[in-house]
Image (tube, rainbow, N blue to C red):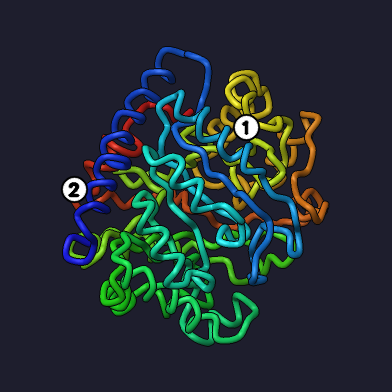
């Protein structure tokens, strides 16, 4: 990262991401401790349903056309900044299909954005525009090597096209990462030291591992990880973090190795393309919707009984992912409120009703603490050190 990226981008990373997030986390901790009106530490923003791929296990409605307006996106960012939150995850669909995206980055030059993308539309021109903004880290999804990428993403030469996006980021000197949603069919390809080295050679600064969640209209629960594979993944991350040539990131476990749910902690919630405030991206039900310029966002968060109940009841029920471990309990909580589905397909509740419990990242007696002292410190003091859970 320090060899590859220009000083201006490194300075933006420190000034816009590192220091403001440290302050934001402390401020969020204080609000939680004092019982002040709720506002999450971070907002994940899905700006559009549109996508150029059709990946299995994706919660986004295929062919959906819902999108946030530029005024709403601008309002979300402005409302968040009022509470000290200047870091945003930008999701889709495929966010690079959203017109005016780079203008948002330029307009909010005091913020930092993580752009979740499949990389196939990330051209040299777009990479140069992101370099000009200086406050964006693309997180490029690589769901397997050649054959697995085509299978998971239901396309042709997807891996090749994704890697062209990776090369564009490296050429532009961007600080970027590579992500992978791990399931049974890509476990052997991606959960190994060779893949870490491959990612490092491509110039990525970090590698982000997720656990596959079988959701959406094409869920494929049969490829979800077994309990043994989840334990193996956790052990792999803990061991490899000691000397990996890139930063290995996860959001599933705290410094002691205990499972956590960012939504139940109140650390982050999600804004859908319909303008709904959702508990997390994969639970597509809501009672609270933004107005035309998102100026009601603070009020919605402060008064939302639905989101407050989700945080409280899920934290009291389990430490892992309720969607995977106990979908029936999740449906019970949702049905206690007058909710609306936020998707274009309109079948999310039936999908939840048909789900069977699956292993999640709560390994219970198989707790594996962090070995890496720097990462343990970051998780304790920078990410998950506040006593917000439960």
User: Left of 117 or right of it: where is 195?
Assistant: left
**Residue designated by label 1:** 310
Q: Considering depth in this image, is 267 or 106 the residue closer to the camera?
A: 106
What residue is rendered at 61% in x and 49% in y?
47
Q: What numbered label is drawn on residue 374?
A: 2
**x then y, percent, for residue 241:** 24, 60
**x then y, percent, for residue 183:** 52, 69
**x then y, percent, for residue 264:** 52, 35
Quadrant of the image containing the N terminus: bottom left
User: Left of 373 or right of it: where is 39?
Assistant: right
**x then y, percent, for residue 251:** 41, 49
Q: Considering depth in this image, is 199 or 4 the residue closer to the camera?
A: 4
What residue is rendered at 17% in x and 48% in y?
373
| Secondary element at image label 2 | helix
What residue is rendered at 74% in x and 64% in y?
62
Q: Considering depth in this image, is 284 or 141 the residue closer to the camera?
A: 141
The answer to whether any part of residue 308 appears in the image is no
């Amino acid at each position: 990262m320090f060899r590859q990226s220009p000083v201006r981008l490194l300075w933006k990373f420190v000034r816009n991401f590192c220091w403001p997030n440290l302050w934001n986390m402390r401020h969020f901790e204080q609000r939680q401790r004092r019982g002040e009106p709720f506002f999450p530490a971070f907002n994940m923003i899905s700006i559009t349903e549109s996508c150029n791929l059709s990946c299995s296990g994706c919660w986004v409605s295929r062919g959906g056309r819902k999108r946030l307006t530029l005024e709403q996106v601008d309002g979300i960012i402005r409302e968040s900044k009022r509470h000290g939150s200047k870091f945003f995850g930008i999701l889709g669909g495929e966010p690079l299909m959203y017109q005016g995206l780079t203008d948002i980055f330029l307009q909010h030059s005091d913020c930092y954005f993580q752009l979740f993308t499949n990389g196939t539309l990330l051209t040299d021109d777009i990479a140069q525009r992101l370099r000009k903004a200086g406050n964006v880290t693309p997180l490029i999804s690589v769901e397997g090597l050649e054959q697995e990428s085509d299978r998971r993403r239901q396309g042709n030469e997807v891996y090749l096209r994704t890697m062209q996006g990776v090369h564009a980021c490296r050429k532009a000197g961007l600080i970027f990462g590579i992500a992978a949603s791990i399931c049974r069919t890509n476990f052997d390809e991606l959960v190994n030291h060779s893949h870490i080295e491959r990612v490092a050679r491509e110039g990525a600064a970090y590698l982000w591992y997720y656990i596959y969640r079988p959701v959406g209209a094409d869920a494929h629960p049969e490829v979800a990880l077994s309990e043994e594979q989840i334990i193996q993944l956790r052990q792999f991350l803990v061991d490899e973090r000691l000397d990996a040539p890139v930063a290995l990131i996860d959001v599933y476990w705290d410094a002691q190795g205990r499972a956590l749910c960012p939504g139940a902690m109140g650390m982050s919630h999600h804004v859908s393309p319909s303008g709904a405030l959702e508990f997390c991206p994969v639970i597509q039900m809501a009672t609270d919707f933004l107005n035309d310029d998102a100026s009601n966002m603070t009020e919605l968060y402060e008064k939302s009984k639905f989101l407050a109940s989700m945080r409280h009841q899920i934290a009291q029920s389990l430490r892992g992912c309720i969607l995977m471990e106990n979908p029936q309990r999740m449906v019970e909580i949702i049905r206690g409120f007058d909710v609306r589905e936020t998707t274009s397909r309109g079948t999310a509740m039936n999908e939840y009703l048909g789900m069977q419990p699956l292993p999640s990242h709560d390994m219970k007696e198989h707790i594996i603490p962090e070995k890496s002292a720097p990462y343990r410190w970051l998780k304790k003091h920078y990410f998950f050190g506040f006593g917000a859970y439960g």
